[in-house]
Image (tube, rainbow, N blue to C red):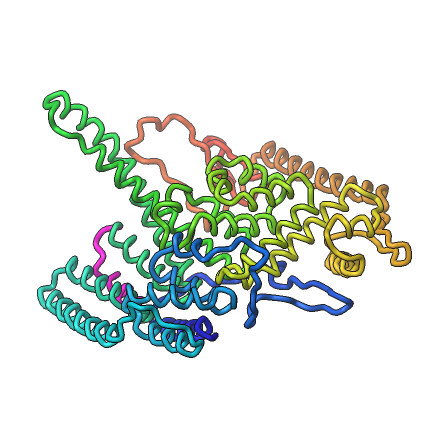
Amino acid sequence: MILSKQFDSNINNQIMDAQNIVESTIAASGDSNNNNSQQRLNGNATTLSYEENYQVDISSTNFELETITSSYTGLMRIYRLLYVADHCPMLRNDTLLTSFKYIQETHFIAFYKQILDEIKKQNIPLPNDFDAAWYERTQRNYVHKLEKLDTDLRNFRTNSIKDSIRRGHDDLGDHYLDAGDFFNAVRCYVRSRDYCVTPRHMITMCMNVIKASFYMQNWSNVLSYVNKAEQAIESLESTAKSTTATTTTQSVLTLMTNPMEVSSTSTTNTIIASDAVLASRLKVYAGLAELATKRYKPAARHFLGVSFDHCSNQFQDLMSPQTLIQYVCLCSLATFERSEIHRLIIMSTNVKQYLELEPSIRDILHQFYETSYSSCLAIMSQLEPIFALDQYLSPHIRTLYYEIRHRIIITYFLPYKNASMTLMARQLNTTIDVLEDELVHLIRSGKIKARIDSKNKILYVADTDQRWHAYQHALTITKQSEKLTRALLLRSAVIKANLIVKDESVIFSVRSPNNNNNNVPRRQFVPNVAGSMMVDDDDLSDEEAM
């Protein structure tokens, strides 16, 4: 099975072509702590990941294919089904047939042929309602519609109607997007930018570019246009706030004069609700982009800002609530402090609605916060095969799991001066040898200040001279106090001597001749004086006095 790999290669080629058309202003760089996550096993440093052609056994899990088909729509459903088909032999036949069914709802003819060839290669019986003429018919309809949209766009350009040209580019981009030609889709969407007149048009353009760039996995471009869309939404909100008071006053007067006339308040509320949905969708896109670039903490914060109502009702083409809370759980446990987990996740009314859909994720978070690390790691181990079937989460499972285990080890050892490695291994569901290798890695990286007694299998806190640290702290405070005192004395002496230091680069404000308070002394800033003092105009001496 190489369908997902073929799709990724096509995406990479489109990204290389799109770089010449679409600007990418935000460099996607991961945290160094997340990029270099490794685990020492059996004395050898190895980095395990789900980035290769791996196979997943889901016999011990409750994973069902219906969770994907019922939670997603459009191209996202097809991509997730094909990813499962590539990495889960138990569900390969079902996922291929299901994806073959849903691919016929689009114009993705290239992918249709690849899926059909794979079905024949696996000797899977074709469904009874198989339409052999679908490929030629869909290709003919695709070309016919493409020619019609291109002709309409040329007519719009001839008439020089900006709004019609913008809509023509959007329609053409939507047609390319439905056929899986993301490069041409981005090109059409970006061209519509020159014909955007209002901020609402800019938001539509940004959302279209983000959607196509997301399918291309061009994460830097996704983050760039997410920022642009958020700025446009903020400008709209500021404009709406300034006009709300006027609209409300007019509505009240209108109702007093004509009670039967309907107020425009409902329209304003609808627009505000639509902007809230857009803001949540942007956070999902930004969270996925941050996750793909291994910036797990910003990703978790973006996901936490997504409203449950929006995600469960309007994001079927992008992400399901069950998937989102899985991302939140792993990213937050790997990067958040316990206080942040309690405040932002456990006590959040919005997140509680997500957790009701995934009781296992809720148990992981509660067990982690209650320091029941053995149960927490056991549940995580059971869910690992399900996480491995997620195309966006699977490349980061090992890194996230390592970071979570390291945080658990650090938190476990924090209140002790010495700890038995035998008991620690039992609590962390691992062996003593693996635990010792992990402790060596943490000690070398400076995350734990301890020493290991390999013979007796005891971990000791490294001896620290508390008296020396107290002296160093006292000396630091003394130097800071001395520096502050000297600055205060210098400022006092300058004020007492009526000394002024002029700076030619600073242009002092000139009093306006229309100012009625000319007799009131104004306070001026005197530059280049320690402490940056303020003096009155009457105290400033002119050049003759100097």
Where is residue 79? Give x, y as percent. Answer: 41, 64
Quadrant in the picture for residue 183: bottom left
Q: Is residue 198 magenta?
A: yes
Residue at 85 percent across and 50 percent down: it is 460
Query: Could one spot residue 187 in this view of the protein?
Result: no
Is 100 positioned to the left or the right of 264 in the image?
right
Work out whether 385 lies above or below 273.
below
Where is residue 85? Give x, y as percent. Answer: 46, 67
In the image, 245 versus 62, the foreground residue is 62
Span shown in magenta: 185-199
Where is residue 498? Give x, y as percent. Answer: 56, 34
Q: Is residue 87 magenta?
A: no
Is 192 positioned to the left or the right of 521 in the image?
left
Residue at 69 percent across and 46 percent down: it is 373
In the image, 103 versus 432, the foreground residue is 103
Quadrant in the picture for residue 467: top right
Quadrant in the picture for residue 491: top right
Is 34 positioned to the left or the right of 136 in the image?
right
Residue at 33 percent across and 65 percent down: it is 101
- Most common SS among magenta residues: helix
Work out whether 313 lies above or below 85.
above
Where is residue 416? Give x, y as percent. Answer: 81, 43
